[in-house]
Image (cartoon, rainbow, N blue to C red):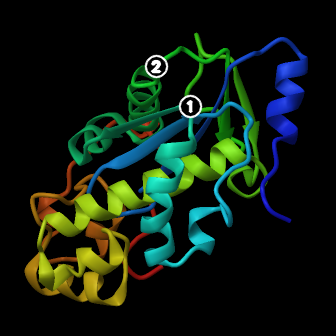
Amino acid sequence: MPPSYAIERLLNAGGSKLVAGVDEVGRGAWAGPVAVCAVVTDLSEPPAGLTDSKLLSPARRVAMVSEITAWAAGIGYGEATHEEVDALGMTEALRRAATRALAELPVRPDVVILDGKHDYLGPPWPVRCEIKGDLSCVSVAAASVIAKVRRDAYMASLGCEEYGFADNAGYPSPVHQEALASLGPTEHHRLSWSYLDDLPRWRHLKRHRNPLAGEGQLGLFG
């Protein structure tokens, strides 16, 4: 089934007039920022074929951006840099990126639908977490497309051809892993992550932070 306005309408009925759907991309990448998009709509008919960005081809995602931009009542986009991820942990980096995205909206929403089960935004924002919200909620699906396309374009703009950023957007593809093993991390890599534990030649570059600051990450080989 395509995304619907069921959750947005339920929140409207509860008194929240303006609902923002929020989704993130880049949480599991080893390089680059984490990005968050917020979308508000007027509950009008969404672009045909709108769904979770992961279910759309790259070409369809890019084409849909202009359709979403013309249709949505408001779009906000924010990032937290790889330096912020290293220094603050993923939860705080996501919170900052989401706060920046929400600040770009033309009007402050009454409630935020976050994709997933973890509220990384917190007060003062009223939040409803929705597992697989990018599949079920129109506004979250739209946010997933914008976030994915914008972050992918940024990662491609960095060059780093040996690491394949134009194709893997900083995620751990085989090409990316092989380049890390032979060339080491670039200036765009997250250096607090455990993939460096599996790279003896580059392990000395790892940055350590308070483990309470954020989640651990998968290593290079598992």
Which residue in the protein does label 2 denote? 106
Give the total number of marks visible in the rendering. 2
Residue 128, quarter of the rendered image: top right
Is residue 116 something that shows in the picture? Answer: no
> From the viewer's perspective, is residue 17 above or below residue 11?
above
Spot occupied by residue 185 in the image (x, y as percentages of width and height): 14, 68
Do labels 2 and 1 touch, CB within 8 Å?
A: yes
Disc 2 to disc 1, how far (Cα)? 8 Å
Spot occupied by residue 125 in the image (x, y as percentages of width and height): 60, 16
- Work out whether mark 2 precedes mark 1 in sequence or the reverse, and give the earlier one: 1
Numbered tag placed on residue 45 in the rendering: none
Q: In terms of secondary structure, where does tag 1 sit?
A: loop
Q: Amino acid at mark 1?
A: Ala
Numbered tag placed on residue 73 in the rendering: 1
Camera-side residue of 205 and 107: 107
Spot occupied by residue 97 in the image (x, y as percentages of width and height): 39, 34
Residue 101, quarter of the rendered image: top left
Residue at (48, 37) in percent of width and height: 91
Q: In terms of secondary structure, where does tag 2 sit?
A: loop
